[in-house]
Image: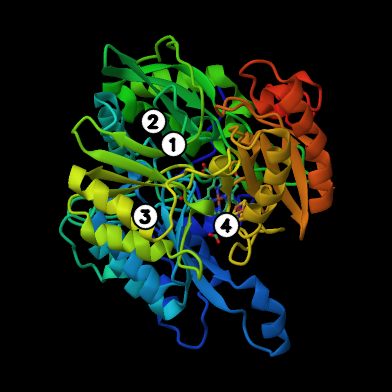
Amino acid sequence: MPDKILDLSKPVPEDHEHVEHIKEASDYLRGTIVEGLNDPITGAIASDDTQLTKFHGSYMQDDRELRNERRHSKLEPAYSFMIRVRVPGGICSAEQYLDMDRIANTLANKTLKLTTRQAFQFHGVVKRNLKPLMQGIIRAKMDSIAACGDVNRNVMCNPNPYQSEVHQEVYDACCAISDHLTPNTSAYYEIWMDGEKVEGTPKFRTETGGDDEPIYTRRYLPRKFKIAVAIPPNNDVDIFANDIGLIAIEKDGNLEGFNVAVGGGMGMTHGMPETYPRLASVIGFASTDRIVEVCEAIMTIQRDYGCRTNRKHARFKYTIDDYGLEFIKDEIASRTGTALDETRDYSFDNNGDQYGWLKGTNGKWNLTLFIEGGRVKDTKSLKLMTALREIAEECGECDFRLTGNQNLMIGNISEADKENIEAKLKAYKIGEYGGLSGLRRNSIACVALPTCGLAMAESERYLPTLITKIEDICETVGLRDDDIVIRMTGCPNGCGRPYLGEIGFVGKAPGKYNLYLGAGFAGERLNKLYRENINETQILDELKPILESYAKEREEGERFGDFTIRQGYVKATVEGKDFHA
Ligand code: SRM
Ligand code: SF4
């Protein structure tokens, strides 16, 4: 039995990461954030506080394209803040969507980013606008606490509870897990709302909770923690990329419970083979009534045993590979008093979104729209932001739902509104998805430049152009409509889950990418490095013969990722530890 790493009876050990000392000294995530916000001399906040604002849902960034110019002019970097709004299960009302739109247009950079974890992001928020923006979110009865930081993040699930009874039950379970694992600290409302209570705000706990963090403790988790729930056969939230992935098991139209998978994560660092993406391992089954306590038990195992001396080794996937799955199973049994049951049968057949119109169990309509790179904005040629705003203003009872693939579902639409929405989309020349190639409708790109401080190459701004060029090849060989999962990120951290792309690109340097091939179409197998550090011409030269041969030589129903393995372009990755092999 290993010793726990978290020991609250002693001061934070010297060899623990600096962030551990910051958390301990922060008085439940307060630090000197208020003082920093009130300091008019700089557009920044204190460095230690930037670690704490993450827990409040905000990252300090600077415009990387202005760095040199500002340095030469002896100005401080062009600081701004990114704010992430948690939307458990991805669902908000039309009214809340309009609040997000208004905030983006008045206090941020007039765009909304729909993220790979069903959240909204605002970019380019200057310091003086940060507090008004946070207040706007909270007055919209939403929140940003725990959207980032060493805590459980936005819990994901399919965003259409009207697809079936089971979808509704899964959505309810997702919200229950999210609510239970939301941090308790009153610092959030104290700092951003001056302690004011807003009726209906999720988890306003100052009255009941105070600062005690019974689940997290004052040191919180060693690292971020992520949970997602999928309903077979659709793995649209990529559960295997999560610290906990839950697979809904139904019987005769009722939810029985969930297979529990643990230890997924995408992040790695170039040149450090001891870091690797890992897919979650399925370890058993828990009935619906147990799922919240099982999630808490798993998360607290990571709280107690996760590495706190090296953040690159601090994700749950490494705790599992260090201690073994049997240890994790035994701990779950001892913490909950009951062992997990035998894993139930399940199978996934895709990890994408089902575009277009779908009628719900309540007789209303739901429409899934492709949003390229998850970016909602107006351009000269496409007034996407305006169109969505007008739909939200006019659509009565409808709601807005974010998918795990950066897309948008407009839900709960009446028959009459369906016609209006179709007319509106036509007027604004917004296709539902018709006309998109199989590559584009299965694409994800992370934010990367210019806001992401970790980006080594473009992603969101570049993938659409690259896809157009790959589409030319696909068109020639007759693959235009074939679904192929393609994903790009500007660095190896994996925010667009690139290691689950049948074609994956990971930025190495400006204009240079590693090319990965061979992931499973349903998100059940990682891909493998095929070519390193290549530019656009090389990418196209590499992909052309493979796509040509796929068009000619694939077997009936064979997916592109499977084909690249069968033909020996790459070896199958069996587990995270052999990703680099
Ligand atoms: Fe991420 C860090 C954006 C999903 C793994 N991620 C970041 C930061 C905050 C950069 C930073 O630390 O300074 C990025 C902000 C960019 C910007 O300008 O907005 C960022 N991550 C995103 C988003 C917005 C990408 C997107 O285009 O949609 C996604 C927000 C999700 C959300 O709503 O919560 C996003 N990030 C992910 C995912 C995908 C997922 O969760 O399904 C992953 C891989 C899964 C995982 O966690 O392993 C992911 N992000 C990372 C990592 C690597 C973590 C690791 O274990 O090594 C970092 C860097 C870090 O934590 O040190 C990171
Ligand atoms: Fe930034 Fe890298 Fe995440 Fe892309 S993958 S958003 S470049 S941290």
Q: Secondary structure at mark 2?
A: helix
In front of the other: 210 or 487: 487
Taking depth in this image into account, of 216 and 386 the one nearest to the observer is: 386
Q: Confirm whether residue 368 shows in the render.
A: yes
- Near mark 3 (Cα within 10 A), the count class, few <14, some 14-19 or many ≥20, is some
Q: Nearer the viewer, mark 3 or mark 2?
A: 3
Report the side of 155 relative to 329 (left or right).
left
Q: Quadrant of residue 1?
A: top right
Q: Answer whether residue 26 is visible to the viewer in this image.
A: no
Q: Earlier in the sequence, mark 3 or mark 1?
A: 1
The residue tagged with tag 1: helix, strand or loop?
Answer: strand
The residue positioned 73% from the left and 41% from the top of the image is: 473
Q: Is residue 560 above or below residue 52?
A: above
Residue 249 is tagged as none
| Residue that label 3 marks | 425
Is the distance from the Cβ of mark 1 to the nearest ligand 1 atom less than 8 Å?
no
Marks 1,2: beta carbons within 8 A? yes
Residue under circle 4?
447
User: Which three-letter amino acid code belongs to the residue tagged 4?
Assistant: Val
Residue at 58% x, 25% y is: 524
Which residue bears the numbered disc 2?
A: 295
Name the residue beneath numbered marker 1. Answer: 227
